[in-house]
Image (cartoon, rainbow, N blue to C red):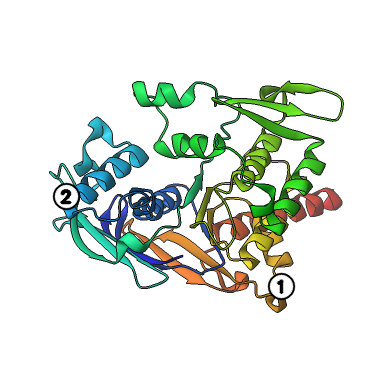
């Protein structure tokens, strides 16, 4: 479990400290406030888990090189220069650190001319074995075939979250007896609402099967493909409540019909109730409100909202609260309120005529 991260002079952030809920975290904010950057920074700091999977001893230099490669492929800075993600105009070094559930820590620094991260501190970091999953904004089922080999060979304009999730989707499914009961339930619910299931043949080949026919994955609606990604990640055990690392999801609502939102929120709440930490970023009022309406403290639900906002000088800060009604500023709710007021004013104007 990821407990908190600290960012200093990193991309847009001069100073940002975020303490995460062990259950569900929802990051909101206007465009350009760094929601995706926050997700990617947290995901990068979780990247030690796969490194230590088959090798328990890694020195600082090897770890720094691995994390540097990860950060470069996630953020894709101009000219592939690490120093480009140092906050412009800052005179002090950039600093990234994370603390995990059992006291494990990792901290690294970089400067504007750095070619690699420098490890400043690591405390039992090799014990962080639960691998995180990042679901990017775009679905990948429509272009999985051949993507991984192309990504390794060419400089495709996709950040590494796309390759990572493609690799996780292409894993074989785990044995049914090892599937969590809530994973089975979620997969069945997704199959029901989609009218069939996505089938993975390996090598990125994906189809969609109903009782009577089989189709190309590309023939299905994009919202169904996003739901299908979640079902498959549960099927492979990449997402396994109580076992896997944090689930990061950037704008799950993108191209998803609002009617799917309630089921998605119900699934995420059930996964979190069974030990899955979830950290997502959203612009969507419907998704945000379903969380607010469906959370049940009696079932141990806990949501923490992290609102990113700019100050008068353009710096980005965060306000973290546990009550939806106290989010300030809440760009999503404010925009919805503005829309409602405009609708009322228009109606009153018509009545006045």
Q: Which residue is under mark 2?
A: 61
Of pointers 1 and 2, the one earlier in the residue sequence: 2
- Residue 339's spot in the image, x, y percent? 68, 52
Closer to viewer: mark 1 or mark 2? 2
> Compared with residue 7, is residue 156 higher up or lower down, i.e. above or below?
above
Quadrant hosting residue 19: bottom left
Quadrant hosting residue 341: bottom right
Question: How busy is the neighbourhood of tag 1: few (under 14 within 10 Å), some, or many (20 plus)?
Answer: few
CA gap, disc 1 to disc 2?
A: 46 Å
Residue ID at (25%, 61%):
107
> Compared with residue 5, is residue 171 higher up or lower down, i.e. above or below?
above
- Residue 307's spot in the image, x, y percent? 49, 62
For label 2, the SS is: helix
Question: How busy is the neighbourhood of tag 2: few (under 14 within 10 Å), some, or many (20 plus)?
Answer: few
- Residue 191's spot in the image, x, y percent? 77, 41
For label 1, the SS is: loop
Q: In this rendering, would 270 be left or right of 331?
A: right
- Residue 167's spot in the image, x, y percent? 49, 36
Q: Which residue is under mark 1?
A: 296
Residue 341 visible? The answer is no
Q: Nearer the viewer, residue 108 or 83?
A: 108
Q: In this rendering, would 227 be left or right of 75?
A: right
Residue 210 visible? The answer is yes
Q: In this rendering, would 313 be left or right of 177?
A: left
Q: In this rendering, would 31 be left or right of 178?
A: left
Q: Nearer the viewer, residue 125 or 319?
A: 125
Residue ID at (52%, 56%):
244
């Amino acid at each position: 479990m990821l407990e908190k991260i600290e960012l200093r002079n990193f991309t847009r952030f001069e100073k940002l400290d975020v303490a995460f809920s062990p259950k569900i975290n929802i990051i909101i904010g206007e465009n350009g406030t760094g929601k995706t950057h926050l997700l990617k920074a947290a995901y990068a700091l979780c990247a030690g888990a796969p490194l230590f999977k088959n090798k328990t001893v890694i020195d600082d230099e090897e770890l720094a090189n691995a994390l540097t490669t990860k950060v470069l492929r996630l953020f894709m800075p101009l000219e592939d220069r690490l120093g480009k993600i140092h906050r412009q105009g800052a005179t002090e070094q950039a600093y990234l650190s994370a603390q995990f559930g059992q006291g494990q820590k990792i901290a690294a620094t970089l400067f504007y001319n750095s070619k690699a991260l420098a490890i400043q501190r690591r405390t039992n970091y090799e014990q962080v074995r639960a691998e995180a999953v990042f679901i990017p904004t775009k679905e990948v089922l429509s272009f999985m075939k051949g993507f991984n080999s192309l990504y390794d060979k060419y400089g495709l304009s996709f950040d590494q979250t796309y390759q990572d999730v493609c690799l996780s989707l292409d894993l074989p499914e785990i044995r049914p007896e090892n599937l969590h009961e809530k994973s089975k339930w979620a997969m069945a619910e997704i199959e029901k609402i989609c009218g069939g299931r996505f089938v993975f043949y390996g090598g990125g080949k994906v189809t969609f099967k109903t009782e009577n026919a089989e189709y190309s994955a590309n023939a299905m609606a994009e919202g169904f493909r996003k739901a299908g990604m979640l079902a498959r990640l549960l099927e492979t055990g990449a997402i396994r409540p109580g076992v896997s690392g944090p689930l990061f999801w950037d704008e799950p609502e993108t191209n998803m019909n609002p009617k799917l939102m309630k089921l998605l929120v119900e699934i995420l709440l059930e996964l979190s109730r069974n030990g899955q930490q979830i950290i997502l970023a959203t612009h969507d009022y419907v998704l945000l409100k379903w969380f607010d309406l469906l959370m049940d403290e009696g079932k141990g639900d806990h949501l923490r909202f992290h609102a990113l906002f700019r100050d008068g000088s353009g710096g980005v800060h965060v306000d973290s609260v546990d009550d939806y009604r106290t989010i300030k500023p809440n760009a999503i709710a404010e925009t919805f309120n503005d829309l409602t007021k405009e609708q009322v004013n228009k109606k009153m104007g018509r009545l006045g005529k």
